[in-house]
Each structure stands twice: as structure tokens, then as C-alpha cells.
Amino acid sequence: MAQASDIRVLHEPSQSDLREREGRAYGGSAEGIRHHYDVSNDFWPLVLGPTMTYSCALFESAQDALDDAQNRKISWHLNASGAPAAKSALDVGCGWGSVLEAFSRIPSIQRSVGLTLSDAQAEYLRQRDIPRAEVRVENWAVHRPVESYDSIISVGALEHFAKREESRDEKISVYRDFFARCRQWLHPTGRMSLQTIAFGNMKREDASDFMNSDIFPDSDLPFLDELIEAMSGLFEVVALRNDRLHYARTYDRWANNLRQNRGKAAGIVGEEHVERTMRYFKLTSMGFRMGKQHLLRFALRPLVRDWAVTGADYWGARV
Amino acid sequence: MSEKTPDALAIQTWCMNYIARILHADIDRLDPEVEVERLGLDSSTAVALIMSLEDWLGIELMPELLFDHPTIGGLSKHLASRVTGAVAQGAMA
């Protein structure tokens, strides 16, 4: 059996899968991300609640509390990415740190890394000082890990990778670059989980200007087939769920929280911003209910040459 | 709300006028017992309707309402019972 030191080296997918970083906005525009998230660290808790998780929750019933549903979602990703047995873990697009916090409660994880492009989120996380977690204000396209990861989670980041003006092929090559890098950073026995919004029964050109320019500038959504094409030869799909109605419900809960805290929120960001956010929440909820957008969750296993690894049913780090 | 609480018919009339206005449609040709989707509402006009109803009635409404009550007739009856409930609750407080 190989020594731990032997198998922790990073291995290379083909160079054609990787792209040089092209321009400041490649792989996620810092300006676009700051526009949406860097409102104020006092604003988002009023909307998101104590978990500070800004992505689709996982409900068991309509009566579930939002916080319970958010924690269930995080557990799903921990299990899908083999985190309970991992030694090192990465969160691409770590937000306000709910996944890093969950990593820190897993005894086997000695080191976790969170990437974000938001200064406000990084500042918030520095104050939280999560044990064994390193937070980097860094684009995944320039991330250079010091050693491989056993577990990679990315929730609600991929929506920012591609730009609206890019062609289908350009979008796929950005996604493929992302999957190739994750595949390269992942230990052969590692796992990855991914959550993203995707276009459903709508055409890309029908996306509303309000959403694309006012709410999420410099961002575009993938189609499921683009992701499948982008990961082909790099990952196999272990599980895939489309939980779009869970996201409609999540947005409804955020709208509810915002309404209840309306006075306080308006004091922080202004009445007009509150009104705009409310409209965005309702529109998005409606879009998920109508199936215009889907919410995809993937459990992925890296494709490796070694059939002894491919056929083994262990999860997480080989100790 | 300072005026008297609207009943189902008042809410229905308000909705039909609103829809006729935003869709530039003849109100007499809009059937309140037909699904709002078939009246021609899309996601943004449906959300506009919901948010305007919220402002008018002073209660919180979620988009799922239109899936539970897909006709204006049914929606109006449901909303009438909610505003009556909200008024009763307010009177008790």
C-alpha cells in the first residue's frame, strides 16, 4: 500500500482542460460578487438568520424551520463530499463560513481552506476565527493548494463563473477548467459536492435584465447538459438532485425574514434597496416554482486510472 | 386599512382591474375562474400582482399562493378569509 506521503501529491489532468486566467473577471468577477454580497455584514443576518447561509436549504417538510433545513443541506454536502473521513477540505465560494464551521467540527479534518471574492465575507470570517480554517480572498482559477484535498464542496459559486456574453462553448470551457482543477486538487479517493442554480425551461436570452444587471452583474447560469459535458472524463456523477421547490421555499423564508425586519434593514441599506431585494426574492421564488430555474446538487467522484481506487468503496482519506 | 375590509368580490374586482391594466386587456374578456397563467400572467406580472396585493391588503403574500389558488376567483376567496382573520387578530391585540 502506498504511503500517505506518496499519494497526497497533486496529479495532472490534461493541459487542454486547463485555461490560463484570462482577464480580471475570469472564473468570477470580484466586482460582480462584491456588488451583491458586500452590502453590509449587518444586513444579511436579518434576511438569512443565524446560519448565514445564502443558498438553497434542504427541507423535509413545509413546516421545517429554515435553520434546520440549512443545516440539513450542509450535512448532505458533507456526506456527498466524504467530509466525515477527510483530512483536508476545500470550500469554493465559502460565503459566511457555514461549511467551514461544519468542517471544523469534524475531528479528522486537520485543515480546511475557504475561497471567497468578497472582502466583507472575509472580514466577517476573520472575526469568527474558525478553528483550522484558512480563508483566502482568491479566485479558484489562481488557487494553488499546498497539498491535495480529500473533500471539495462548492455551493452557490458556479453561478458566478461564466459571463452573459460568453458562447455556450466558452461557458463549457470555463466550467471544464473548474472541474479539471478540482479534479487535480482532489486526492484520488476524494469526493466533491456541487450545488448550483441552472436554467430550466427557459432560454438564456429570456433571463430578465433586472436579475442580470441589478442583482447579479457579470454572472450567468449553466444548463445541466453544459455541466455534464464540462465534467465528462474528469468526474462521475454519483448522485444528482433537482431541488428547485426547496429553493422557492428558501426564498419565501428570506422574504418573510426581510419583511419582519424591514425597519431595521431599511435603516442599514435604505428603503429602496429593501424593496428591490424583496422583489428579487419573490421573482426568484416564482421562477423556481415555474421551473424556469433548477437547483442542482451533485455528488461527484473523480475518475482515476487506478481501478483499485475506482472499485474501492471507501470514502474520504485513505489513512 | 382605514376603509372597511374588502370581501371576496371586492378583491376579485380589484385583481381583474389590475390584470386588465397591466396586460392591456379588455376586462370583460377576462374570466376569474380561469387559471391566471391562461389569462396571460407570466412570472414578473404575477409577482407584480402579488406585491401590489400585499400593499393594498397589508398582509404578506408568497408566490406559492398562485399555485395553491390558481384562479382569481379562488385566490380572492382565500384572501378575503385571510384579511378577515387579520382584522379579527388586530382587534384582539
Image: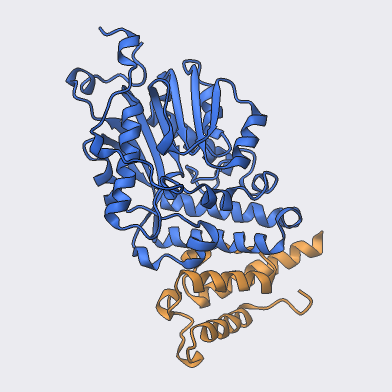
Chain colours: A blue, B orange
Res. A224 in view: no
Q: Specify the quadrant that holds the N terminus of chain A.
A: top left
Residue B14 sits in which quadrant? Answer: bottom right
Q: Measured along the vertical axis of the image, is residue A131 above or below residue A58?
A: above
Instruction: Work out whether residue A111 can be spotted.
Output: yes
Work out whether B68 lies above or below B33.
above
Residue A226 versus residue A138 in the image, above or below: below
Give the quadrant of residue A281. bottom right
Quadrant, the C terminus of chain A = top left
Query: What x and y, as percent, mark residue A116?
Result: 52, 38
Residue shown at 46% from the left, 80% from the top: B33
Q: Estimate the x, y position of residue A181 in percent, counting from the top left.
A: 34, 34
Q: Residue at x 34, y 65 (%)?
A: A203
Task: From the viewer's perspective, tell me whether residue A257 is left or right of residue A221.
Answer: right
Q: What residue lies at 56% left-to-right and 72% top-to-bottom? A: B48
Q: How many marks?
A: 0
On the image, the x and y values in percent for residue A210 come to 51, 66
User: A247 or A91, which lies in front?
Assistant: A91
Q: At 62% from the left edge and 48% from the top edge, which residue is drawn?
A: A38
Specify whether B4 is left or right of B10.
right
Please state if A84 lies on the left or on the right of A264 as rendered: left
A260 or A11, which lies in front? Answer: A11
Q: Would you place residue A111 above or below residue B7 in this image?
A: above
